[in-house]
Amino acid sequence: MRIVLLALAVVAGLAGADIPRASVAKPAVKAPAKAARSDADIEGDIRRRFAKSKIAVDGFTVKVRGGVAILEGKTKVIQRKGVATRLARLGGARRVDNQIQIDAAARAAAAARLERGRGRGDGHGQERRRVQPVPQR
């Protein structure tokens, strides 16, 4: 039976019969390129995002030049610097120059908490236990 099928395939190939092949789907239309936004639009979008967020209490300033957002200000909460960067990127900035300064007391407190956490081992006040390897059979 295999020989008969093989012979038919060879004859069909020689005769020029179309053998269906898996087709590769190509997108019919390319996605349109994003329209370039003006610096004022990007700056306004970033300011609106800052106003809706908890970081609004710090009153950071935003300037956008050539698609690059420049953030300035001071904060006592370390995480707000990173939040400001993410919000600026979401607002349309191509790049972010984050010049926000973190209060020295906040830095010292965070470093102390980090060091205390390192000493605890498992995070619950217990020393880290050593795990014995399981012998292989």
Image (cartoon, rainbow, N blue to C red):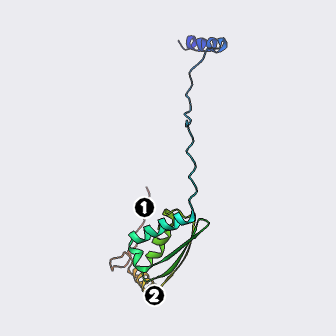
Query: Which residue in the rendered view is the most extreme toward the bottom?
Result: 105
- Residue at 57% x, 42% y is 30
Q: Which residue is mark 2?
A: 108
Name the one closer to the observer, 54 or 18. Answer: 54
Q: Amino acid at mark 2?
A: Ala
Q: Amino acid at mark 1?
A: Pro
Q: Position of residue 42 (x, y in %)?
A: 52, 64
35 w.r.t. 73: above or below: above
Instruction: Confirm or deny contact between disc 2 and disc 1 (CB under 8 A).
Output: no
- Residue at 57% x, 25% y is 21
Asked whether the viewer can see residue 65, the reply is yes
Q: What is the crowding at mark 1: few (fewer than 14 residues within 10 Å), some, or many (at least 20)?
A: few
Q: Which residue is mark 1?
A: 135
Q: Which label was assigned to residue 116?
A: none
Q: Position of residue 137 (x, y in %)?
A: 43, 55
67 w.r.t. 110: above or below: above
Q: What is the crowding at mark 2: few (fewer than 14 residues within 10 Å), some, or many (at least 20)?
A: few
Query: Which residue in the rendered view is the most extreme toward the right?
Result: 14
Asked whether the viewer can see residue 86, the reply is no
Name the one closer to the observer, 32 or 79. Answer: 32
Name the one closer to the observer, 32 or 82. Answer: 32
48 left or right of 63?
left
Give the structural element (helix, strand or loop) at label 1. Answer: loop
Q: Position of residue 65 (x, y in %)?
A: 60, 69
59 left or right of 20?
left
* Residue 27 in which image quadrant: top right
Q: How many marks?
A: 2
71 left or right of 116?
right
For the residues marked 2 and 1, what is the alpha-carbon distance in whole angstroms? 45 Å
- Residue at 44% x, 75% y is 80
- Residue at 58% x, 56% y is 36
Name the one closer to the observer, 81 or 93. Answer: 93
